[in-house]
Amino acid sequence: MDNFIPPPSGFNNDTNGENTLPAAVDCESCQYVTFDSIVVRHTSASGLQLATLNGHFGPPGNNDVIQNSAFYDIGSSGIHIGHLPLGNDVAANVIQSVIVQNNIVQGYSRVFADGEGIAQGNGDQITYQHNDIDDGYHSGISVCEMGCFGANGNNIISQYNHIWNVMQGITSDGGAIYYQTGGAQKNGTGNQILNNLLHDVNDSSIIENGVLGTGYGGHGIYLDGQSAGMSVENNVVYRISQDSVFMTEGPANGQPPNTFQNNIFAYARRAMFRENTAWPQNCGGSTRANLISNIMYFDQNDHTGFYAIEGCADSCGTAFNQFQNFQRNLYWRTDGQFANYDRAFHVLTTTPPPDHASSCSQPPDPNAHWTFFTFPTWQNGHPRVDGRGLPMNEDAEGTVTVDPGFGNTGQATDFLLSKSPVSGFDFMQTNSTIKTAGRTNSLIKPPQVLPTFPTYYFTTF
């Protein structure tokens, strides 16, 4: 029970859980330290922090472990890694080679609503695995919210975590897992989001719908900035108030695309995949994203403001598959009518003028800016763009006619499969996610934490 009192600046003092608030336990430049089977509870600010005193000088914190521990009834973030990233950070001096595993963070952000379950400022070679993160008012895992552009944010791996019941209608602009590891000049490498079970993310649109600038951004997997070269594989993501996957921008020109492969994305309210500002540095870059062998399962349509693929739909004059590369994906709408739906996919009818591609994002009125068409046109059609036929060439081996046969109990086991419903999909990987994500040893069982704020949930998806 700490004695931290919010300062005169008020409760919005934390920078998305990344270090302006104190932690109950702070281990600076610690090396070869293991925190095992500890409990941190009833704090006004955050729980446990591992960081380096100076990101550009002196000894780094390294080879530390946080495991088998519980963090509950936490005022801000449960676990902090690193400090606020700075432009003069040096990879050799930031916190590095840390493992955070088999922990539970439950009932967090109870005083500062923007606290995250696990928040990373700067750092390299950090692994988050087999953690349970539940019942928080903002994101589950947040990596480099203020941007780690090359000197930081390398080899950050989030795998086999179970994250659910986050944001809860209280905050916006977050998600179950958030990374911002790329910028216009530099990009982190080796970053992976693998085999995570993510569900029940509700942003504040449920109470603020129609209020300008609020009520948005309850995503499953959220790649912010110009994050590039990330591998997002074998995740199961469902019941999401906005997008299953959201890319704020495309990778910087010359940087590799993000790859989303062998995931199950289900029951998002706005989109299965959205890339908002695809060309932040204007046309000239290569492929923005690869989406390969994913299952996209949804029950909404454009009458509710839902589109399977959203965001910028400008391929900068290239065949559409050179812009976003879709291969061997399954698209299934639960009413079985998506195969014949004439508004299943779309392209931007009139593209921005030369050197203005950076203005392309989600249009306010899709009906006025998009040309809609069926799945066969998505595969091999030539819809009119700027008065000329544009080849699509997407998803030659994909399908809209196969029902994967998911259950309807509302549990993660609904998405277990006994065979592959589409070519190239490895159902053994997603079954492994469902069966083994989260803690492997749950000896510490924290009690349910009473809410601080009134919480809200969408009851239908």
Image (spheres, grey):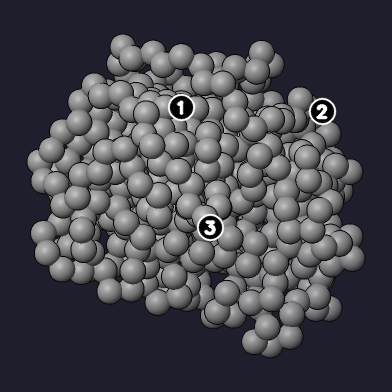
Q: Secondary structure at mark 3?
A: loop
Q: Is residue 440 left or right of residue 405?
A: left
Q: Is residue 355 above or below residue 230?
A: below
Q: How many other residues sit within 10 Å of disc 2, few (<14), some (14-19) or many (≥20)?
A: few
SS at badge 2:
loop
> Does residue 74 lie above or below 231 as drawn?
above
Closer to the eye: label 1 or 2: 1
Q: Which quadrant, please, contains the C terminus?
A: top right
Type of amino acid at the residue the image marks with label 3? Ser
- Lateral position of residue 307 relative to residue 15, left or right: right
Labelled disc at residue 73:
1
* Disc nearest the viewer among 1 and 3: 3
Residue 335's disc number: 2
User: Which residue is more in the foreground, 77 or 348?
Assistant: 77
Give the CA distance from mark 3 to mark 2: 51 Å
Q: Which numbered tag is attached to residue 242?
A: none
Quarter holding the N terminus is: top left
Q: Is residue 375 above or below residue 269?
A: below
The residue where tag 3 is placed is 9
The residue at the point 40 percent across, 46 percent down is 119
Closer to us: 438 or 401: 438
Kind of residue sitting beneath label 1: Asp
